[in-house]
Structure formats: structure tokens, C-alpha cells
Image (spheres, grey):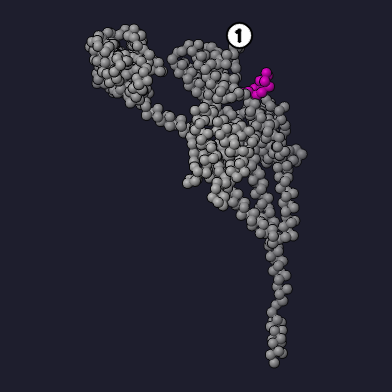
Amino acid sequence: MQTIKQPALRANMLSKMPSYHKRFTPIACTITGLALALIIALFYWLYSTSKDNILMSWSNKAQQTAQNVNYYMKMPMDAVAFSSLKVNEMLAQGLDHETVNHYLVNETAIYAKVIDENTTGVYCYYRGRYLDGSGWTPPKAYQPKERPWYKAALQGQGKIVLAKPYLNIQTEIMMTSVSQLLNDGESVVSMDIFLGGVQSAVYTIGREEEVAAALILDGEGFVVAHSDTDKIGIELGEHGSDLERTILQQFSQGQTLTKAREMKQEEKETTVQRLELNDSSGKKYTALLTKINSDWKVLFILDKDKMYASLVSIYLTSSLFLFLVLGTCLSVFLHMSRKYQEAEELSKEIQAVASIYVSAVKIDLASDSMTIIRSNPDIEELLGGDMANFSGRAKGLAEKFSSAHSRELMKQFMDPTTLEKRLSETYSISQEFVDNKDRWIRLRFVVVDRNASGALQHVLLAFENIDEDRKQQEALRKLSETDLMTGIRNRGNGEYLIRKAMAEGIKGMFCLMDADKFKLVNDRFGHATGDKVIIALAKSLSMTFRESDIVFRLGGDEFAVFSKGVVSEEIGRKIIDRLFKNIAKIDIPELHGETIAVSVGAAFFPADKQDTFESLYQRADNGTYQSKKVTGNSVTFVGPDEPPSPKPGL
């Protein structure tokens, strides 16, 4: 029975169930259709993402080019700013042409070492006369006020400005001038810059297959550099190609379709603008425009067909293969998607590092090789394209990029034989030093990974520019040493420097002085007028004594000076008389004609072998006390064993 009923029951049950084949076919078709749609969608997404990555890569190149040009121009611009500050001080002091020219010659010699060979040196138009730090003597027909550098400075009204670039006939290299108008509204400090490095950077970009044109423009559309060297020095709006003129016009009218990239760094936004357009034949182009830190711009014109050509063939071939092996492709895609996400996260991490470090090199300790992660001209020049033999070159590299007094320290820091020990209990070690261009740099070794046995496998060598931080620290230090009202040194800093000079055996004259009847000035005319008197006295002291002398305010209306090298009363009296003349010139309307007089006590160091700052101060203080007995400006010189003898000033 069982052998009969069992098959019958099974057949009955199967007859009541729907056909598996009938159910599978529509489900399979639906799944296949969905899978195909998903693959098409995924490939479209990958294609779009790859296009965006290519565009982002070119956007990064545009930004990097702008940063390189800015780096190239920054040091000459800083040099003009510094020189202008010094010449303004000389202008205020009324110094003669020979003194200013001597300063320009010295500065040109310094800049020749710091700024390499992209400048001819600093020159200026000072109080009606042209002065040149490089020693060039202009012809008689030369009119400085008619030169572009002078006119640009006048238009800049005291700002650092760039003159319109021009082609140097002798060198056939584009040049420009950095200029600044001085405080008198007529004098100008300037420096010429060779733009050969800028042209070289643009020419290198222009050799890439995707680039139809790469150029740098000034604010008026003048071509400073071009991948086509025949177009250097033209006005793009007038003599450029039809495509270039169209792009320039649309960018100037703000007709950008989208922004290729926005990156916020240290609360400053750097934007690369993108423009899509076709030429008269229908050929498609992408134009990228980004600003340099002046009114100059970097412009890339890219051939879209060439830019995305590799993507078309790659994705068509991959699509055919994936349609044949659907299951394999899905797993491969999931793997690729995961890797893409990891790469994107890694890219974010690298971008975060890039915002801190000016350059970074990844070192493979197993293969003893290097890979540039973030580049700049300094690191490229340093490595010279040789990425091998890190252990053999480490100390030599340290010697190249560090200044003379930092070399031994950096050789020890770069020593690869001690890296394992120094990084055994930490992920990072750093060292601050001065590089071969006198900039403060922080160099850091960072552990990337270790092998299975725990030994170092990859480390990151990162360079951080901390020069600005050091300058800020120096500014804060100077602020702490400065009397806020008068701008000269305060008592703590002044006494410290005098004690230091005395310890070094430097001889000199020490003077104490204060204003006569200063309390009456405050009582009769108010404390605001009293403050003006104190400021005027400090200015008179600064005008009288040298920069090497130590001038400081003790407090209230009391001041002190240590004049180095002055060891005789004859010379000392001449200096003090000059001070009295400067004080006599003080004109404060609020005093209503009342004059300012000071009492001065002076003593010389050293008086004997046991002379100290305290005894020197006491002698000068005794002299001041005696000078108070004389009406008007008076000075009393006090020796170690002689009674004070006050003498009136001029």
C-alpha cells in the first residue's frame, strides 16, 4: 500500500504546486533587468565620478600653478615692502642720497642670495634722484617718473603694486616691476622681476595632451606667460584666438556655468571657476580660471574629447565584460566601491595634511625609496628627481636644505639608523630649524605603518613653514620689551641690555635725564599734554642717539641712555648738546609757548675694575641731581672720584 500510495500522493502534491520554471522565468527576467539597470546606473555614476575626478585634478593643477606663481612673486614683493619701510625711515630722518644708495647696495647683495636670480636688485627714486642698488647708471635721457614702475606706484597710492609686464629685449624674458610709493607721495622703491620661472611652469603644463592652451594674464588681459611662446606679451582681448577672446569675454562678464572646485582653508576661500563652451566648428572645451594673490589669473583651456577619451574606451569595454559575467562584476564593483570610498577618505586625510605642510615625502624603509606626496619647488629641487637611496642621501639632504648653524642638528635628526629607536614609543618626532633661505621650518617624521614583526615600514617626512609663527612670537617679544606710550625700550629691557653690554666689556657713556618741573605741566595743562611732552622727549632721544645705543624710558618723565663707545667728556658733551638742540625744536601748541628743559647726569663705564651697573647708575643719578640746580637744559658729568659740576646746555 505504501509503495503505491506514496507516489500517487507525491504526484498529487506536485500537480497542485505552480511550475518552478514558470515562476523562475519572470523573476529571473525582473532580477536581470534590475541588475542591468543597476549596472548601467552604476557605470554612469562611475563615469560621471571619474569625469569629476579628472576635472578636480585639473582644478588642483590650476590652483597649484597659481600657488607656485604666488610663491615666485612673494619674496620680491616682501623685499620691496621691507626696503620701503627702511627708506621711509630714512626719508623721515632726511638722510642724504649717498646714505640711501649705500643701503640699497647692501640690500641688493642680500636679495641676490635670498631671491636667487629672478631679480636685478632694488632701486628707487628718492628726493628727486634715481638710485640703483645694482650699480646701474642710467643714461642722461632716462626719466624715472616716466617709467611704468613709477607710474604704477603712484596709482597704487602706497600699496605694493605690479607694473605691466614687458619683454626684456636683451634676455628675451618677460619682466615686471614691484613698486611702492613712499610717505612723501613722490619717492618710490622698486624691484624688477624676471618671469622666466613663470613661463617655464606654464610651458610644462601646456605640453600635456589635454591642454589646448595654458596662460597667465594680468588684470588688464595682458599675456604674461603662454604655452604658445609666440603669444607672450599680447593683449588677449585683441590679438588672442577667437576661442581665447570668447573665454576672456565670458569670464569678465561673469558667465561661468559652475564652479569647478571650492576649497575653504584657514577661513579663506580659493575658487577655480569653470566654463563649458564650443568653438565655431563645434569642438568642446573646458576653461578653468583661478586668481593669483595679485590681480593676475591662471587660465587653462582643456580639450574635452582628449580629457575624457580614456574613460570612453575603458567603460565601454568594461560594460561588455560585466554584462557577460554579471555576478562577478557585481562583486568586483562592490569591492571597487569600497576601495573608492577608502581612497576618498585617504584623499581627505591627505588634503588635511596638505593644508598644514608645504611638502611631504613618503619613505619606504624596506626598499629605501621615496615618493613625493605633496610637492613644492623647494622639495623638487632638493630631490632632483632621484627617489632612491634615502639612507645614503639623508644626511646630505639635511646639509642641503638647512642653514650653516642648523646643519649638524639636522644631520642627527635625519639619521635613518636611529629612526627605529626614536619612533619606538611615539608616532611622531619633530625638529625646528632655519633652512638655507633663512626661514623657520618644522620637520616631522610620522609613522605610517609597521610590518608584521613591528618594524617601521613607511614613514612620512613632512615640512611645515613656521616662519610666520616665529615672526609673530618675535613681534610679541618686542612688544613686551617696548614702552607702550613712547615706542622706545622699557626699563626692564634697557637695564638688561646695559648689564649684558657691561658683561661683554663694552665701554660707553650712561646718561639719566628727566624733564624739569614736569609736575607743573600736568597740573597747568593736563595729563594729556604731559603725555605729549613725554612722547616728544622720547622722539628727541631717538633722533639724537644711534640705533646701536640703548635708549629707554625709566618711567614717568625719566629716561636713560647707554651710548656705546663714547668714553670722553668732549664727545659726550657734543652728543648731549645735540639732544638739547632737538629738544629746543619741540613744538606742542597746548603748552602755549612754554619750553621744555631737561636735567642730565652722565657717567662713563668703566670707572674702575670693580665698576657695576649700580655704581654707574648712582654716579649718573648724582649728576642729574646737580643739574636740577641749573635753570634750563643742563648736563653734569660725574667721574668716580670727582664732585659733580653742573653745566648748562646750549
* Residue under the point 30% across and 16% down: 609
In the displayed structure, 9 sits above or below 83; it is below
Residue range in magenta is 166-176
* Residue under the point 68% across and 54% down: 43
Question: Magenta stretch: dominant SS?
Answer: strand
Q: Nearer the viewer, residue 37 or 389?
A: 389
The secondary structure type at the circle numbered 1 is: loop
Q: Nearer the viewer, residue 261 or 469?
A: 469
* Residue under the point 28% across and 8% down: 648
Where residue 564 appears, as percent x and y from the top left, is 37, 15
- Locate the C terminus and report the quarter of the image it occupies: top left
Magenta-span inclusion, residue 18: no
- On the question of residue 6 being in view, the answer is yes
| Residue 281, quarter of picture | top right
Location of mark 1 (residue): 140
Q: Amino acid at mark 1?
A: Lys
Residue 112 relative to residue 323: left or right: left
In the displayed structure, 21 sits above or below 427; it is below
